[in-house]
Image (cartoon, rainbow, N blue to C red):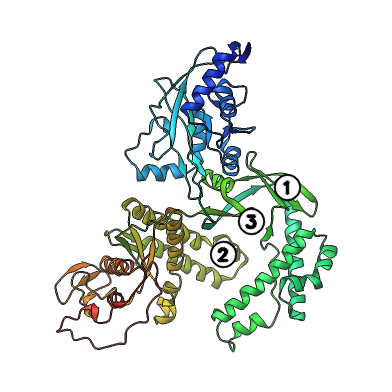
Amino acid sequence: MAFFLLSGAATSAPQLIPRTHNDYAYQARAAAELVSLTENDVYLAALPAEFHFTFGCPGIVGTLSAGGTVVLVEDSGPAECLPVIERERVAVTSVMPAVAQLWLDVLPTVQRALARNPGASALGGIASCGGDAQHRSICGFGRGAARLVRAFVLLDVLLDEGGRCAVWGGGEVGGVPGGMCAVRMPVRRVAGSVTVVKLTVQVKLLPTPVQAAALEETLHACNQAATWVSSVAFEKDVKRNFALREHTYTAVKDRWRLGAQAAQHVIKKTCDAYTTLRANLKAGNLGKPSSKRYRRAVEKPIAFRREGAQPYDDRMLSWQYTQSTVSIWTLSGRMKGVAFTAAPEHLARLALYRKGESDLLFRDGMWFLTATCEVPEAELNTSVTQFLGVDLGIVNIATTSDGQIMAGRRLNRGRLRERTLRQKLQRKNTPSAKRRLKKRRRKEARRARDINHKIAKHVVAEAERTGRGIALEDLTGIRARVRLRKPQRATLHSWAFAQLGEFIAYKARTAGVPVVHVDPAYTSRTCAECGHIDKANRASQARFVCRSCGFVDHADRNGSRNIRHRAEELWRCGVQSTAPDPPPEHRAWDRTQTQHHSQWCPLCKARDLLVPGR
């Protein structure tokens, strides 16, 4: 028995190649045995099924002969293949180097893996980071026997904590560029639920004028309906979702021609706004009940801007990752083929981890969709014994205990320049001045956010590379505790320390790096060498001179070392995170005597406590 096989020639027309059943079956079984295929494995046919490499090397025939499962896809692009791998729990696939390189280009995890393993081979753009994956390379053509050998360049298999495959590929094999690789990917099964980090991915929509008009009409109608629902909720004092539906659901659908899902999201958005208002009032963020700001917030219903964000669920919005388009509900009906664009790494994250609602918003003449992604946390590294202390400040945004200083001079100068320009334009109050103010709004915040992202990324990467945890100060309430002169208040209140701390925290969670918050009391006055505490130790903003032992250092670096010591003490005591302890009672320190911090330090007192182990 024999059959004709199509050749996979890329530069000429395919040829018919006769193959006998016996030799082809033997080749498929041998390849399946080499890759260790079993009945529990799932094979992804990413390349065309008629291709010799996909069909029987080990391919579809080898997988079925072992009792496994075969999954077919129409396109070998990463936007279609990576979600299928996640959904079907694919364990084996076969790809060409060009296809593998496409997958590598959309996944930034390879660069992080290379930083962790600088000795890995990187031929052909593919790196080997070790692990328990099994890799084989295949040379040959459909017209003859294939030769299966170990890859000269191993493949990179990266898995997240949920056991999902991140990337794999192939390289040069046997001196033949374009060698192909069959990959067996170890799938990690995690018992129970997986802890995830919720991140947002923002993509920019590229609608046509007709599509933009439909989106604008829909957004305006939804926000007008939300404002009306808010007035009903305020008048009837009904702020709960299901109770408010009884009063507004039918009217919202009929009056504004909204669909069932859109009407429910409008009502839920209104209830969420009142929930946020109650939380802010309770936390005192709007001042005392007698203040004008507080009364203005509670004496009238909440109003929504015409361009306010509108949530969409999967019934109203679908994503076509391969075509980079979305299908979205509007008042004019379902609108398909709305193009979008984003960074390659964001597209990969969107395809792998998007879950839940997405928000449609219009800002500065552009349309955006903000999607929620649930990224699994990496396994926490509980074997760390040392920490990287980080001292946060205004003059120096962050200073590590290793001595690296991230200066804030450029950011602070930019803030001062923007503040001066805003004051000047506000005094003019002309139409052109208002246009310039509108054009420059959020520029300062975007710059600060970008800088904080870069600093957080660097700090987490350094801690992950050296196998350490991260120690931060808990600065909650510092603005209420500190009293400054009027010229200094703007500088203090524009200090984005909380944002930087949040960025470090979520990036550390995705990298498995532990973060410990410590009490910042007296870290700037304590000598990191002898522990002597004295206000006079801080000779200037940047200079620390111990009055007891004569130790001299940069003031922020000395503070970061104290933060590191406190975090290591807490970690040894079994505490993974702490809230700030109340400051000790003010006492008159005798500058002629050496006062050791163990007299009051809660970290030293923690040694006497019975703390259960981690």
Q: Position of residue 284 (x, y in %)?
A: 54, 81
Residue closer to the observer: 258 or 207: 258
Sequence-wise first label, 1 or 3 = 1
> What kind of residue is marked 3?
Gly
Label 1 Cα neighbours within 10 Å, binned few <14 / some 14-19 / many ≥20: few
Q: Which mark is residue 356?
A: 3
Sequence-wise first label, 2 or 1 = 1
> What kind of residue is marked 1?
Pro
The residue shown at (35%, 74%) is 519
- Looking at the image, residue 113 sits to the left or right of residue 22; the answer is left
Q: Which mark is residue 435?
A: none
Residue closer to the observer: 508 or 365: 508
Is residue 223 shown to the viewer in this render?
no
Q: Quadrant of residue 538?
A: bottom left
Q: Which mark is residue 209?
A: 1
Residue that badge 2 annotates: 437
CA separation in Å, label 1 and label 3: 28 Å
Q: Position of residue 405 (x, y in %)?
A: 31, 60
Q: Nearer the viewer, mark 3 or mark 2?
A: 3
Sequence-wise first label, 3 or 2 = 3
With respect to residue 442, does 94 lie above or below?
Answer: above
- Looking at the image, residue 217 sits to the left or right of residue 289; the answer is right
